[in-house]
Image (spheres, rainbow, N blue to C red):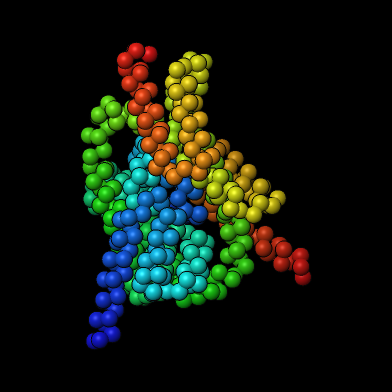
């Protein structure tokens, strides 16, 4: 019984921690991860710093938004399956509420002329934001011949109308095959 | 039926998102426009909204689209769908994550996926730029319009902020101010 209570308590704490994280982080995944680290490593001491680094590595190499993967994983480490569900629910709840609110009033909002002017400008700003994200990921990568070929292939495939999902699946498969080929060569 | 379809579509989006954030803009854009849920322009507006509200873009987008298509049940279905792959996959590998990180096939897969994700960002950037610069397609009038000058000036200012490593919301505020100024000028002088 005591164990059960403890688990329930942990789950509530997880939910609350991740609710705060979800509600307070602007600017998407990367910002969220440093916030998660402060909360669960420094404050709550649920996991060690080293574990956190591993968790982020896993979150980056599994499908799904990185922030959600990280929440799920931390939740699992602290409270098993239930913990992971509570942590994920917590991190999603605030953005969910805000988005429903925006979706409900967006059309009304957009009927204001001045807002429309602003959005005409903001659309241009979004190009700059995408460019910024591109530069950041580009410079964080080790760039060899394989990188350039894969980059060009994916870019051309999507631009010329091959669906995004097949491109992603092929890229993963080609990556795995490249390992197989180099293994066979080294034999 | 709508609700189940939303769940499935956003499940696919969640399952194919690698690299997070902007890497999945192209994927989401494709899925929501193919299904007629949003116009490309709405997707662009949405990136700005998502950047100025808390939460990952994928989750924000799922909730927003879900609500627009089928109200609150739709929002719940789409958000659940986008989160579900994370939950399932992490639960499976959480116990063996050390082995997972060390596995050379995982590393190999990522070696293929990372450049592809960057390629997707580039493709999203270019198609969005085309939509913003030439919303009515390519023509001589659209190239030689005041709109183009406004767009170029705004983009130049924003790129300067990118170069100065400014935070995203500064870029959004600056571009919104440019839009406001340009809209008012157009209104006053009737260009």
**Residue at point 51% right, 69% down?**
A54
**Residue at point 23% right, 46% down?**
A101
Task: Tell me if residue B106 can be seen.
Answer: yes
Task: Examine the image and state in which quarter residue A115 appears.
Answer: top left
Placement of B54 over or under A60, stated as above or below: above
Placement of A1 over or under B109, stated as above or below: below
- Residue A41 pos. (x, y %): 41, 70
Query: Looking at the image, which is closer to me, A45 or A68?
Result: A45
- Residue A133 pos. (x, y %): 50, 46
Q: Residue furthest front?
A: B164
- Residue A118 pos. (x, y %): 34, 30
Residue A83 lies left or right of residue A159; in this view the side is left
**Residue at point 51% right, 30% down?**
B156
Residue A184 lies left or right of residue A12; in this view the side is right
- Residue A104 pos. (x, y %): 23, 42
Q: Quadrant of the C terminus of chain B?
A: top left
Query: Looking at the image, which is closer to me, A155 or A39?
Result: A39
Residue A75 lies left or right of residue B75; in this view the side is right
Query: Looking at the image, which is closer to me, A145 or A128?
Result: A128
Q: Residue furthest bottom?
A: A1
Task: Examine the image and state in which quarter residue A44 appears.
Answer: bottom left
Q: How many marks?
A: 0
**Residue at point 51% right, 19% down?**
B143
Task: Tell me if residue B39 can be seen.
Answer: no
Query: Looking at the image, which is closer to me, A131 or B27?
Result: A131
Placement of A32 over or under A116, stated as above or below: below
């Amino acid at each position: 019984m005591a164990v059960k209570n403890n688990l329930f308590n942990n789950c509530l704490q997880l939910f609350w921690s991740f609710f705060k994280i979800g509600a307070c982080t602007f600017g998407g995944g990367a910002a969220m991860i440093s916030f998660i680290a402060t909360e669960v490593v420094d404050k709550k001491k649920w996991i060690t710093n080293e574990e956190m680094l591993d968790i982020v590595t896993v979150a980056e190499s599994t499908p799904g938004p990185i922030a959600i993967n990280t929440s799920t994983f931390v939740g699992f480490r602290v409270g098993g399956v239930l913990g992971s569900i509570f942590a994920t629910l917590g991190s999603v709840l605030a953005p969910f509420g805000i988005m429903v609110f925006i979706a409900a009033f967006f059309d009304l909002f957009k009927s204001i002329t001045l807002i429309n002017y602003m959005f005409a400008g903001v659309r241009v700003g979004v190009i700059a934001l995408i460019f910024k994200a591109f530069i950041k990921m580009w410079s964080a990568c080790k760039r060899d011949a394989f990188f350039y070929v894969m980059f060009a292939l994916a870019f051309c495939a999507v631009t010329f109308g091959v669906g995004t999902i097949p491109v992603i699946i092929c890229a993963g498969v080609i990556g795995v095959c490249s390992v197989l080929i180099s293994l066979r060569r080294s034999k | 039926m709508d609700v189940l379809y939303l769940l499935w579509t956003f499940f696919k989006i969640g399952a194919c998102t690698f690299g997070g954030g902007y890497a999945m803009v192209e994927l989401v854009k494709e899925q929501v426009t193919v299904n007629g849920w949003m116009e490309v322009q709405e997707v662009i507006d949405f990136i700005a909204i998502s950047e100025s509200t808390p939460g990952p873009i994928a989750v924000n987008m799922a909730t927003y689209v879900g609500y627009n298509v089928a109200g609150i049940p739709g929002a719940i279905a789409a958000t659940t769908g986008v989160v579900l792959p994370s939950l399932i996959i992490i639960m499976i590998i959480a116990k063996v994550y050390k082995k997972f990180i060390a596995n050379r096939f995982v590393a190999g897969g990522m070696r293929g996926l990372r450049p592809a994700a960057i390629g997707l960002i580039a493709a999203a950037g270019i198609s969005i730029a085309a939509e913003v610069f030439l919303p009515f397609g390519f023509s001589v009038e659209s190239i030689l319009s005041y709109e183009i000058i406004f767009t170029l000036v705004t983009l130049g200012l924003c790129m300067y902020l990118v170069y100065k490593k400014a935070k995203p919301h500064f870029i959004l505020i600056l571009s919104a101010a440019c839009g406001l100024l340009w809209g008012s000028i157009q209104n006053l002088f009737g260009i």
